[in-house]
């Protein structure tokens, strides 16, 4: 699973595992569910086929808060108990028997199924799932255990006005009145946490990979102009990974579906990636924040995570480290070597800082952070490839995937495959890179110097700046002019912007690429009068991040021209989080004498973006700007309490922290007390817990 935007590298959700039952093996499931978006209830039926390896007297399934109307084992009623989150079937079954289980049930999922936009007039209400290791049992009696792999066929019934997308091949559809039923077929087994569906207003674009796999790319009808930049390089990435990994794509088709307010950046459900619609962007936005890495990361999981699945959390590197590394290789294929090596340089710096802070972690630690599992994991594969050689590395990967396909794997099994392929003893490699809590920074930098001329140049620049008495800018200028690497120039701007004169920065603006100009817009702390006219040109750049930073800094340092700058950017919206528009509205609202007749409209628009029918990124930005400037209206306060109960933990944390901050004011306390009568039961319970 890819890292979520904003705090994308720093959060990792720990997976715990339920008790395992090794005497039974569930092999096939026919699932039928009907979803009611208004009651948020699921009515379902599942027929399981399973085999017994030994004699058993009982077996169980995970089932969170479900009501069962039918429980039949081999077409007969069977005794069962429901305790906690399990249903236990009590029946003596002989060894090596094949059995059938029917469960009819009803459930109102507490999590794992998310109903977005059904409680208000929303232009695109959605329903989507997120299993995350063990949560599918909130909507389907299944297994909170990755080692139980089942071939799932899924039948879903819903309002015919919407599209319903799920794992597998869509075999048939049928309509009865206002309801439509979609029948999806899977041909191979998978862990139940990878079962998924998404419902909403969607259109799709389809391509075929070079190997003939259908690639289905979904989008909202209103986003038709964003399809190309959003899914740019998708087929190239797919074809590259099939060739690079050396094992054919293991599933029948591949779908990608954007959804609103997703919990993460993306999730690699089998053959069916669900990702945040914050990455549905236009061509300008592609420069600032694109879907390429997430696209490649989730696709790589179809082999590393879905075809072969970790045994438990202590082997999590085998999923996230691999997906991260192969995503970086895909970006190398698309964007070039410099992009790849500088990304590794950036993550090595982060891992070094973790080690210096005494928080370094081994890759075998089941409680390690995402920075360790993702980025240190990617570094291990980069260095392993160097250690064993290109040919033997690829041979080892292929043999590992073939040997353990549709099974669960451990780190020792993977390392044994690499030793067998290379004929090398990798014990010392494991000690240094997997078991050691410290990141081997010097070894990493030695490798980067060897592979990347621009990184080697950067190290030489740093050495000269530390050892030479001459003026820093003269040294920097020499290295700058001697390289055509944007990444080197961005690193110089990030690390040494305070050493650069106005004339140097003007040269950067006039001659630099859009990427370099963006770095200057972000890293220039103060815009001087001598830099003013050149900096103003950044307002015309094809980068929403450059426009946002340039507008804010010019507005700050040149108050006499605020109206000019606001007029120039008035029609710009920006990224899906409306980064430019939210800033513009805030500045327009507080700029004296700027469009005084429209001040109320500016406030109304900005204030309206806290409502629940907007994405969490837009809402968070609006809350922040309002609280930092004119304060929150009564409706904003109601929206904030609502946000404190949101399913996204990042947005929920932001909202709760802001609420706590506001409640330090007696005025806000009084206002919340007056507004309590407008809250629903859950919201009222929460605000009472904060104000009583």
Image (cartoon, helix red, strand yellow):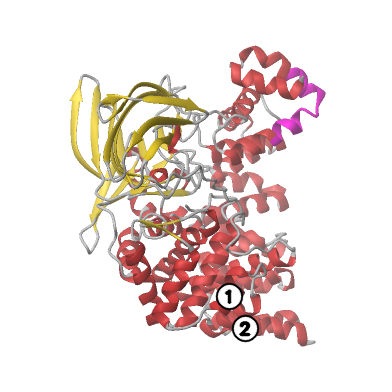
Residue 663 falls inside the magenta stretch: yes
- Which quadrant holds the C terminus? top right
Residue 412: assigned label: none
Residue 587 falls inside the magenta stretch: no
Label 2 or label 1, whichever comes before in sequence order: 2
Q: Nearer the viewer, residue 208 or 460?
A: 208
Left or right of 692 on screen, residue 488:
left
Q: Main secondary structure of the magenta part?
A: helix
How crowded pointer 2 is (Cα within 10 Å; few <14, some 14-19, many 20+) is rated as: some
> Residue at 74% across / 63% down in the picture?
358
Circle 2: element type:
helix
> Residue at 51% across / 61% down in the picture?
317
Marks 2/1: CA–CA distance: 9 Å
Residue at mark 2:
479
Q: Nearer the viewer, residue 602 or 102?
A: 102
> Residue at 51% across / 82% down in the picture?
451
Residue at mark 1:
488
Marks 2/1 in contact by CB < 8 Å: the verdict is yes
Residue projecting furthest to the top: 677
The answer to whether residue 393 of the structure is visible from this angle is yes
Q: Nearer the viewer, residue 18 or 674?
A: 18
Which region shows up in magenta?
Answer: 657-671
Above or below — where is 518 with respect to 682? below
Count of number-bearing discs: 2
């Amino acid at each position: 699973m890819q890292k979520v935007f904003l705090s994308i590298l720093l959060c990792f959700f720990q997976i715990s595992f339920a008790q395992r039952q090794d005497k039974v093996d569930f092999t096939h499931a026919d699932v039928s569910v009907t979803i009611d978006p208004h009651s948020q209830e699921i009515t379902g039926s599942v027929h399981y086929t399973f085999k017994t390896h030994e004699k058993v007297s009982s077996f169980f399934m995970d089932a969170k808060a479900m009501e069962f109307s039918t429980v039949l084992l081999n077409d007969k009623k069977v005794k069962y108990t429901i305790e906690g989150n399990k249903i236990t079937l009590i029946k003596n079954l002989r060894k090596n028997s094949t059995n059938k289980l029917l469960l009819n049930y009803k459930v109102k999922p507490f999590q794992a199924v998310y109903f977005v936009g059904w409680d208000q007039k929303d232009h695109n209400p959605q329903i989507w799932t997120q299993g995350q290791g063990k949560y599918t049992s909130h909507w389907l009696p299944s297994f909170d255990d990755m080692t139980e792999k089942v071939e799932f066929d899924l039948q879903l019934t819903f309002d015919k006005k919407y599209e319903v997308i799920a794992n597998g091949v869509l075999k048939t559809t049928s309509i009865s009145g206002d309801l439509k039923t979609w029948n999806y077929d899977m041909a191979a087994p998978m862990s139940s946490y990878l079962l998924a569906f998404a419902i909403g207003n969607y259109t799709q674009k389809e391509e075929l990979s070079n190997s003939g796999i259908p690639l289905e790319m979904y989008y909202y009808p209103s986003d038709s102009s964003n399809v190309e930049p959003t899914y740019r390089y998708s087929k190239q990435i797919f074809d590259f990974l099939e060739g690079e990994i050396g094992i054919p794509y293991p599933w029948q088709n591949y779908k990608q579906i954007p959804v609103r307010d997703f919990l993460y950046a993306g999730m690699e459900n089998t053959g069916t990636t669900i990702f945040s619609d914050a990455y549905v962007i236009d061509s300008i936005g592609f420069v600032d924040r694109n879907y390429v890495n997430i696209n490649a990361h989730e696709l790589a999981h179809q082999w590393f995570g879905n075809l072969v699945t970790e045994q438990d959390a202590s082997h999590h590197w085998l999923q996230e480290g691999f997906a991260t590394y192969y995503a970086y290789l895909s970006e190398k294929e698309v964007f070039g070597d410099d992009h790849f090596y500088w990304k590794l340089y950036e993550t090595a710096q982060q891992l070094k800082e973790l080690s210096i802070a005494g928080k370094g972690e081994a890759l075998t630690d089941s409680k390690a952070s995402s920075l360790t599992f993702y980025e240190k994991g990617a570094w291990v594969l980069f260095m392993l490839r160097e250690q064993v050689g290109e040919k033997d590395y690829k041979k080892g990967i292929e043999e590992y995937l073939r040997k353990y396909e549709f099974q669960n794997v451990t780190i020792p099994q993977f390392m044994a495959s690499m030793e067998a392929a290379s004929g090398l003893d990798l014990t010392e490699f494991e000690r240094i890179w997997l078991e050691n809590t410290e990141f081997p920074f010097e070894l990493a930098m030695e490798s980067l110097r060897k592979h990347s001329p621009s990184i080697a140049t950067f190290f030489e620049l740093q050495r000269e700046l530390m050892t030479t008495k001459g003026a820093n800018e003269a040294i920097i200028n020499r290295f700058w002019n001697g390289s055509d690497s944007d990444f080197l120039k961005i690193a110089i701007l990030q690390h040494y912007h305070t050493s650069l004169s106005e004339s140097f920065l003007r040269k950067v603006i006039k001659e630099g690429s859009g990427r370099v100009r963006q770095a200057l817009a972000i890293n220039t702390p103060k815009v001087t009068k001598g830099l003013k006219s050149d900096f103003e040109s950044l307002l015309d750049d094809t980068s929403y991040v450059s426009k946002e930073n340039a507008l804010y800094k010019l507005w700050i340092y040149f108050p006499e021209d605020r109206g000019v700058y606001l007029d120039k950017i008035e029609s710009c919206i920006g990224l899906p989080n409306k980064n430019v528009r939210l800033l513009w509205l805030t500045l327009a609202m507080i700029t004296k004498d700027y469009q005084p007749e429209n001040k109320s409209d500016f406030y109304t628009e900005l204030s309206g973006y806290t409502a629940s029918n907007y994405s969490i990124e837009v809402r968070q930005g609006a809350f922040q700007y309002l609280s930092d400037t004119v304060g929150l209206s009564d409706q904003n306060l109601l929206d904030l309490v609502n946000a404190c109960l949101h399913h996204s933990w990042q947005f929920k944390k932001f909202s709760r922290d802001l609420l706590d901050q506001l409640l330090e004011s007696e005025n806000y306390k009084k206002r919340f007390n007056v507004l309590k009568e407008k809250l629903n039961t859950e919201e009222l319970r929460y605000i009472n817990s904060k104000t009583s």
